[in-house]
Image (cartoon, rainbow, N blue to C red):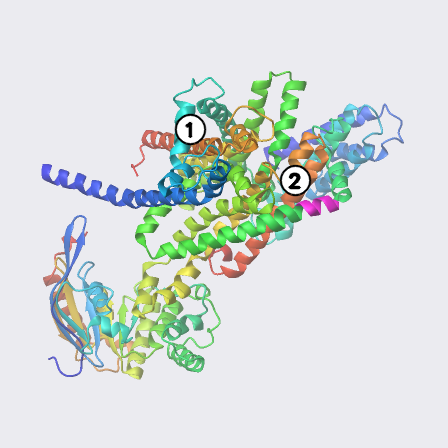
Amino acid sequence: MRGLNAVVSAQNLGLTFKTNDGDVVALSNVNLSINKGEFVSFIGPSGCGKTTFLRTIADLERPTSGSLTINGQTPEQARKDRAYGYVFQAPALYPWRTIEKNVALPLEIMGYSASQQAERIRRTLDLVNLSGFEKKYPWQLSGGMQQRASIARALAFDADLLLMDEPFGALDEIVRDHLNSELLKLWAATGKTICFVTHSIPEAVYLSTKIVVMSPRPGRVTDVIESDLPRERPLDIRETPEFLAIAARVRDGLRAGHSYEEVA
Amino acid sequence: MNQLQFFLALVSGGVSAAALALSLFTPLESALLLKIFLALGTLSLVRFLVPLGLWFDGGLAVLGAVAVLLSIGVFTPSPSFLWMALVAAWLFAWLFVERLSKTLAPGLSDNAGLGLLIPIMFGVSILVIWEVVTRAGNVPQVILPPPSMIWGRITASVPTLWADFQQTFLKAVLIGYLLGCGLGFVVAILIDRSPFLKSGLLPLGNFVSALPIVGVAPIMVMWFGFDWPSKAAVVVIMTFFPMLVNTVAGLNAASSIERDLMRTYAASYWQTLLKLRLPAAGPFIFNALKINSTLALIGAIVAEFFGTPIVGMGFRISTEVGRMNVDMVWAEIAVAAVAGSVFYGVIVLIERGVTFWHPSVRGA
Amino acid sequence: MAFARSRHIHAAEVAAMKRTLPIIIVLLAIVLVWYAAAIGMNAQWQNDVYRRADITNVPATQFILDTWNQEKPVLPTAHQVFGELWNATVLVAPNKPRSLLFHAWVTFSATALGFVMGSLLGIALAVMIVHSEAMNRSLMPWIVASQTIPILALAPLIVVIGFNIFTGTMGIPTDPARLMSKAIISAYLSFFPVAVGMVKGLRSPEAIQLDLMHTYSASANQTFWKLRWPAAMPYLFASLKVGVAASLVGAIVGELPTGAVAGLGARLLAGSYYSQTIQIWAALVAASILAALLVIAVGLVEKLVNRAMGARPA
């Protein structure tokens, strides 16, 4: 499984938070390999560690055991090399910056020249269909547009890995469907590796080439499903038997790893 | 018409009628305008048969104010109908404001100009009542001079007032304010990197804000002499702590997602500070700047009560009170009030420009 | 169970230590700087003293001790200030004008009277503003604007004029008259924060909470007592704390221009006339202690009210 082109590789990865009420095992014995160009979804109920795993890849959390490499480097080195773009649950656009200035933020920090910045802003805003909104402020845009701007911001500096933490969780289903198909087009156009956290089964199946099912207490991987759906996916693929079969397997995986009465 | 409006309409008309009856015992041509006002006021009682526009009440209030002001001194002592006319004019103004605010309430932001009319109406009413009561009631000037006399004093003493303003505001207040706020800001940035210093200094800063800091004035006068530097020093101490506490709070205002974002960019401390935390702290910093604008003026004026060269607003106030030149005191206070409001207003304008994105500014 | 409890108490103690330790160390640093500065600032005077007395070759330790124990130092040291505080409180009968307790009491009584008057006025005004749109539109802009005006500038005027009216026109004896005129300034200063805070508090219930009262077809009175008033309590106490501190400042400033002989403000002024620096500092510390006690007292009342209202302990 783990070839030369493994972008993310985790072995026996564990992470334990120390709290006032004792230790909480957020990740336990996670083994996973993500190859270049894959679209990987992480699905599971709250507290299963899917977001924690993404944050660990991003060096926002430190693992307490096991090993984790990104492009063969430690997460910290990868972060300092700006190896990934991160899209958070909320757009987290800075309200005092216009949309184009928000996209320019990472470019400024990474020291791109003004002309490079202008070129990349144009290109990435075009990619997420936000051309014409450069001079708007975030609070003048709808929630879906704000999240698209935050994706543009993550794409602007051309990292090969895109980490997305429930980016469409706060949006209504119609907007979410639309953004999902946009995201697939974007993935096809850029060939990036995408790690995508969600708690929606249709969303995970529709988007992914690989679905990682996780369960809580302790957070662990219970199933890894390789999807054989074609890369070209119209929205109505969700009614095909192949799609429903994969969705059923995901649902079984979730049920097996978890009894719902426990959910706090 | 609600209960209050009904009551106001009834009483204002009734008082007008009673005053009109009383005024008819005097020669018709003396205080004619007042009588016209009272007649119209009495006529307003027809509103219980025919509805009257709210601008009729507004007009009556203005007419009444002018008429009463012009009729002071026509009769001595002031007759009871003059006082009743004043009450009637005030009631008409109240009725007008009451009706206007009822019509404004649904479309709040539409009529900004009309909305402004109401507080102006209130301010002018206070001035008119003040003027009439002091002049027609022969209130001794040492107790309360009429506004017209204060205005006369202001126009007659521009050089003195300007010299005092220069000494107190342009030197002590502005210099002390800039130094105190600047120092508070810089110290906040410096201690921001040390959680230990932060947890040591912040409770002290909060504690100090409850203390009567103006009390350090005599010490500062002893250390820095009688001239403006000692006042500026008081201002520095008074403005330092609010700035320190607010800036430290503001630097922590950025959300954890926003900070994580900077971390995923591997941004340096200074990049995070300049591009995220300082802009996010803007509303807090401006809050301190606004609080401090008032504190600075208070500090400088009160510090002058402890000794100054023979110039300065606080000095003038304390000496002229001693000489019972109350109009001069009021003139200084008027200048201080205008200076304080303008100072505050300028900071609010800058705040709107800088923190235009904040919900409180863009009205979201 | 017992084990768990003791562990919790232990954790609480550690947390308290972690909170207070930095404060203590910063305070110690301030005291160190204070004593170091006292050497520098009092050195010149000390050298003059030696020169006049023809004393030469003073050992360094003697020199430092001397700068720390002058009679009218530029910067008195902590032990001098607290010594004066001790002398002027414990060692003097509290009814003598030498006693700081006496002066603190004079200032406190004006502060308390003014604070009560100002707070009641502020609350009353806030209630009217919340219930009348005309009042709101007429008064609110002026209340906000008046906060930008250096109200304390009025203090000498109010004190002198008020005193004259109270003693002259009303024939009130001098002491209560003086108290009343100071209390008016205090009331004036505490009234603004209380009015503004209370308006905010009475308006703090959310639309759905007001809608709920509306569905019960509750009267304005019921909505006020069952929703607006309890909701305003946190705002009220926050602004009362600001108000009581402002009241104290008002009373102290009110004692400056009268030629008053009693009160902490008068003590500051007298100290400044006669360059009695230690006396100034002691009065200042006394005023600070008084301020802290007043704020703590308001905080205690807040806790009692919260408990009576059955609020969750913070």
**Callout 2 and callout 1 share a chain:** no
* Marker disc for residue B146: none
User: Relative to C110, does residue A213 appear above or below in the rendering?
Assistant: below
> Is C144 inside the magenta-drawn segment?
no
To which quarter of the image does residue A210 belong? bottom left
* Label 2 element class: helix
* Residue type pointed to by label 1: Glu
Q: Taking B34 as reference, is C184 left or right?
A: left
To which quarter of the image does residue B97 belong? top right
Q: Which residue is mark 1?
A: C84
Q: Which residue is mark 2?
A: B333
Q: Residue at x 46, y 26 (%)?
A: C104
In depth, the one of A29 and B298 nearer the eye is B298
Q: Residue at x 63, y 21 (%)?
A: C166
Q: Position of residue C263 (x, y in %)?
A: 51, 26
- Chain letter of the residue carrying label 2: B
What is the span of residues highlighted in magenta in the rendered image? B158-164
Label 1 CA crowd tier, 10 Å (few <14, some 14–19, many 20+):
some
| Pointers 2 and 1 in contact (C-beta within 8 Å) | no
Q: Taking B357 as reference, is B264 left or right?
A: left
Q: Is residue C216 visible?
A: no
* Residue type pointed to by label 2: Ile
User: Relative to C100, does residue A237 appear above or below in the rendering?
Assistant: below
Q: Taking A137 as reference, is B83 left or right?
A: right
Q: Position of residue B109 (x, y in %)?
A: 57, 53
What's the magenta bit mostly, secondary-structure-wise?
Answer: helix
> In front: mark 2 or mark 1?
1
Q: Residue at x 31, y 32 (%)?
A: C310
* Label 1 element class: helix
Q: Position of residue C31 (x, y in %)?
A: 36, 42
